[in-house]
Image (cartoon, rainbow, N blue to C red):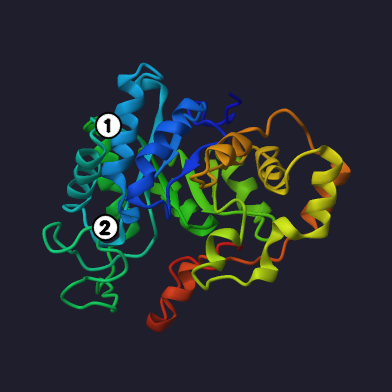
Amino acid sequence: MQMLKECPTVPLVGLGLWKASGDVIENTVYEAIKAGYRHLDGACDYGNEKEVGAGIKKAIAEGICKREELFVVSKLWNTFHKQEHVPIACQKSLDDLGLDYLDGYYIHFPISLEFVPLEAYYPPEWTDKPGNAGKMKVCNPPVSYKETWQAMEKLVEAGKVKNIGVSNVGVQTLQEVLSYCKVKPFANQVELHLYNQMPKLIAFCQANGIAVTAFSPLGALSYISIGMANADEDALKDPVVTEIAAAKGKSAAQVALRFLVQQGVCVIPKTTSPARLVENKDVFGFELTAEEMGKLVKLDRRRRFNDPGEFTKQWDMPFGWPIHA
């Protein structure tokens, strides 16, 4: 499997585990590992880590892979940003996954919400349910990103995590982290697809040895059903994409994924379909020409579907947005 140049342990194509329900995700993870996936991208907030862990356990028990061959990712949720809460959150993910260590652990969002005890509600999501359902309570004063990052570094020292990373941040936040970190971020995970390309952010990360992972690499598909995107924003139906796909004898999804992979960006498309698992991984047997890449570059709309900046307008706190800058 082709690997990222700057982070050779991370396969370029992984399986995204967001919006994958518990009743099917165990088998999906198992089938994905059987199909050759070695990068599994999850999070506390997805609410399915126990099932993900069961799928991993089954695959290892059957000898399909060894634990050290997998790159298993989780993410620190917003309610656990204080230094004393970071290890609690990490250990909960490890316990649910049934693992001794994580290969990658991201700070999910650069937003600090008030702590919600595990026994009160887990995962706490964007609210502190059940006590104050529907309202986000921001830490006041906010927990500094530096405090959270330094607590993440201690997880590496303790052997709980192999690599720590950031997510949903731009160049300004990355520059700040690089100015004080003892352990450099191994990756920055952001929303990247044909309609949201962010070439300057990619260039900055790669120039500084930070891998880039694209969540929602197929664009609007993950968001149409939940009202965060319109049907006419589906890049996979764009005439430029479908024309290139037809010429290559590939699907539109494969073209969209190849566009990112060809730039050295890791992609983590989500699917529970065995056929799509195989299709999404099959992006190394063809190459887009310079002309085709140029046509696809022109599709950029700077359109983010999952924009944390929208969540935080009520507080008048920038949190480093927009990340295009």
Q: Quadrant of the C terminus?
A: bottom right
Residue 117 coordinates in the image, percent (x, y)? 14, 60
In this view of the protein, which residue sits in the foreground, 319 or 194? 194
State the residue at coordinates (70%, 37%).
262
Residue 250 coordinates in the image, percent (x, y)? 76, 40
State the residue at coordinates (82%, 38%).
248
Confirm whether residue 105 shows in the render.
no
State the residue at coordinates (59%, 59%).
221
With 30 as the anchor, is 193 left or right in this view?
Answer: right
Q: Amino acid type of disc 2? A: His
Q: Residue furthest left?
A: 119
Q: CA distance from mark 1 to mark 2?
A: 19 Å
Q: Hey, which quadrant is residue 67 in on the image?
A: top left
Secondary structure at numbered mark 2: loop
The residue carrying mark 1 is: 101
Q: Residues within 10 Å of mark 2 (few under 14, many from 20)?
A: many
State the residue at coordinates (43%, 68%).
319
In this view of the protein, which residue sits in the foreground, 58 or 79? 58
In this view of the protein, which residue sits in the foreground, 113 or 72? 72
Query: Where is 226 relative to 106, above or below?
Result: below
Confirm whether residue 205 shows in the render.
yes
With 142 as the anchor, is 7 left or right in this view?
Answer: right
Q: Amino acid type of disc 1? A: Tyr
Q: Residues within 10 Å of mark 1 (few under 14, many from 20)?
A: many
The residue carrying mark 2 is: 81
Q: Hey, which quadrant is residue 100 in on the image?
A: top left
Q: Earlier in the sequence, mark 1 or mark 2?
A: 2
Residue 194 coordinates in the image, percent (x, y)? 69, 55
**Circle 1/circle 2 CB separation < 8 Å:** no
